[in-house]
Amino acid sequence: MSTIVSVDTRDIRFPTSLELDGSDAMNPDPDYSAAYLVIRTDAADGLAGHAFVFTIGRGNDVEVAALDALRAHLVGRDVEELLGDMGAAWRLLAHDSQLRWLGPEKGVMHMAIGAALNALWDLRAKRAGLPLWQLLAGLSPEELVSLVDFRYISDAVTPAEALELFRAAEPGRAERTAKLLELGYPAYTTTPGWLGYSDEKLERLCREAVADGYPQIKLKVGASLDDDVRRLGIARAAVGAGFPIAIDANQRWGVDEAIEWVRALADFDLAWIEEPTSPDDILGHAAIARGVAPVRVATGEHVQNRIVFKQLLQAGGMAVMQIDAARVGGVNENLANLLLAAKYGVPVCPHAGGVGLCEAVQHLSMFDYVALSGTMDGRMIEFVDHLHEHFVTPAVVERGRYLTPTAPGAGTEMHEASIERYTWRGAHVAEVPA
Amino acid sequence: MSTIVSVDTRDIRFPTSLELDGSDAMNPDPDYSAAYLVIRTDAADGLAGHAFVFTIGRGNDVEVAALDALRAHLVGRDVEELLGDMGAAWRLLAHDSQLRWLGPEKGVMHMAIGAALNALWDLRAKRAGLPLWQLLAGLSPEELVSLVDFRYISDAVTPAEALELFRAAEPGRAERTAKLLELGYPAYTTTPGWLGYSDEKLERLCREAVADGYPQIKLKVGASLDDDVRRLGIARAAVGAGFPIAIDANQRWGVDEAIEWVRALADFDLAWIEEPTSPDDILGHAAIARGVAPVRVATGEHVQNRIVFKQLLQAGGMAVMQIDAARVGGVNENLANLLLAAKYGVPVCPHAGGVGLCEAVQHLSMFDYVALSGTMDGRMIEFVDHLHEHFVTPAVVERGRYLTPTAPGAGTEMHEASIERYTWRGAHVAEVPA
């Protein structure tokens, strides 16, 4: 028996705005940041659970305050009891009525709860000696169902239906695990498409993406229609006809504007339009989906919880679900999201990039393949080649595929030296060698 | 010319859980709290802007951290410039791309932005020597439109339509101002209906509410159907046939359960069912509205922003809009909400109670009456007789009506002694005389 003895938090910020990496129509100068926590126990194994909320700079301190607010719920708890019933762990944090008032189930507090749960999952996976995807894919259908909060989604998927979905996938688990370990999981790249890049850099990176084996690229759009036409022309010429190009507006438009703008770009043969408008506008997404068909609408990186995902599916507003590992209520709520996608037959192509999002979210897609959807068809995980060097078990993409991680844990642990160097002390770290 | 010199914040918590005041099906033991800020300037008038986010206890510190994160945006700014263009003030705070990532436009960060804007409005009203409702109701239609962010709502109401709505109400402003000052504004009371009260207390408070002149009462429901039937029976007998009784489930149910439960209570002749399910479930509200008609669905106290209100109206999921002064992006976003209600012809019956919510929200309803909807028909503001003594200009209800405030400001300033006494220092204030 062991006990949680500390929850350490850190405000970590990388000076990405200095390079214009990650710039888009709504986020011109992000500083990729992590509100980071470490859950430590008094067990002899010395293992700790690490996780984070991803932010883009200012306000990372607010997210750290939200992590700090969870300390009293965790310190002193029996570790085996907590990790042994992660559905109860969700309820402990997400159903605290006073904290819930701050959302409910959205924004700063909900993301912090998600990170705390993810840190517990990291610890559980490390204790099991398994990568998170494999730990999850080895759980019984009954335990998987027990992890999900069906409140507010049982009109779309019931616990009984969820059990059926997990049971239906059970027979092929071993075979798919072997295939996953052999082949990895498809990736697509956003590296060429940031708005801050020159035309020359865009063209070069598009060619490199194809040469590197990626099955799809994505371009940021929405700041200027003329620029979008020019940049899509360059990209299409660089990658050739038929090669999938997705576009991403990062919530720039209203509903009518989104329809007009995407129609004006439709000749470039678009794989999807991502975040055409506010992530809160379910009916707007549905109107846009009707207005821009056959271009598919993708969204999710800012979708606050399972309740909004449910409605996007019910309303026909989302043809591609883009879960994010650090936006919703952790692994538990993403299991709900994966179930909803499975129920509605929509592919999940996770959002990643930022800091550590690739490392974290790959486990969810891989679990989904082995134990739920059973397929990689039409699925791929975003990949951006930034900041991976700060993680103990960095995501690795080769020939357009994520290599399947085999190290124990959830992939969310940062190097101690990176934590130290990039801890925010009121100004960007001096760009001197460490 | 003057400059903002400080933004002081405080974590203020009242020990309401000790009395079970405010208990409902989702919030059994709230400690009514305020994340409070004061914006001070170097002007000779010595005036300061006061406002707060209302929370129910734990996590109030997180909300204070969010207020602190706004300090750098405010300190050093030219006061006249800021107050003279409050649409720009909204954009300064709500469009900060890095802070926006923490929502976007929802939860802890968005509520903090709302409080900062409300503090600026308090300061502007004090400088003008007017109560906020009267300051707002004296602005030109053009300036009112300039305060509203139409991003993501222009598919429902355009700036041109908003201008028309304000212009249409302009001729009667003087007459309605006089009437408002004479008659006040209708209130309804939730005091009888908390779940923690005994049947005897419920009955007594119901009779008192009628005797006090309230036109409607509201009961909390949703913990137990048997209890709800018994309590509604007691209430109906106490107030008599035909007297409006609303019920409030505080998000307790899923969609199907809500329909069943409300149908089982429909014989009690319900004025509305409030918050039947998650405030995020727009399609769910619409399904419930269809399922429980002719009982009306009311919601809003947890609706995160104008985008969700827009959709609740578009989907037919909300027959009564319950704006809250401290949930959304301040006065500016509530102007958007009032415009949406006016466009769709839905009455606004604000949520109040808590700490200072009555004081704050009355100004919005009164402004709406004078300068937008032009009517009090079917409108009333919630009133709970708690904690008003802590405010410099407390809301006053007599014979079932809010007396129209005439003191300068937004009503959101607390007594210095209350701030000092109830500042959270890790435990509830000892219940000794101050």
Image (spheres, coloured by chain):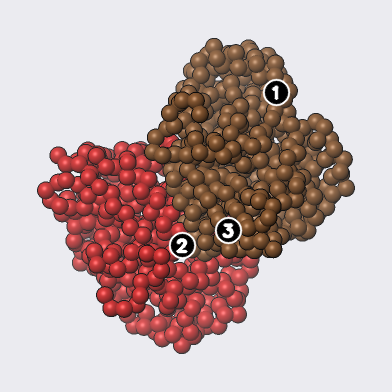
Chain colours: A brown, B red
Tell me the tag on residue A214.
Answer: 1
Q: Which residue is mark 3?
A: A5
**Residue at the spot 47% in from the left edge and 43% down from the top edge:** A11
Mark 2 to mark 3: distance in Å?
21 Å
Mark 1 to mark 2: distance in Å?
47 Å
Can you give x and y, in whole percent of width and height, for residue B45 in the image?
12, 51
Residue nearer the viewer, A259 or B101: B101
Q: Amino acid at mark 1?
A: Tyr
| Left or right: B278, with A238 as reference point | left
Q: Is residue A207 visible?
A: yes
Q: Amino acid at mark 3?
A: Val
Q: Nearer the viewer, mark 2 or mark 3?
A: 3
Q: Nearer the viewer, mark 1 or mark 2?
A: 2
Alpha-carbon neighbours of circle 2 within 10 Å: few (<14), some, or many (≥20)? Answer: many
Quadrant (top left, top right, bottom left, bottom right) of the N terminus of chain B: top left
**Residue at the spot 84% in from the left edge and 35% down from the top edge:** A179
Q: Which residue is mark 2?
A: B58
Disc 1 is placed on an element classified as loop
Q: Determine the chain carrying the residue at label 1.
A: A
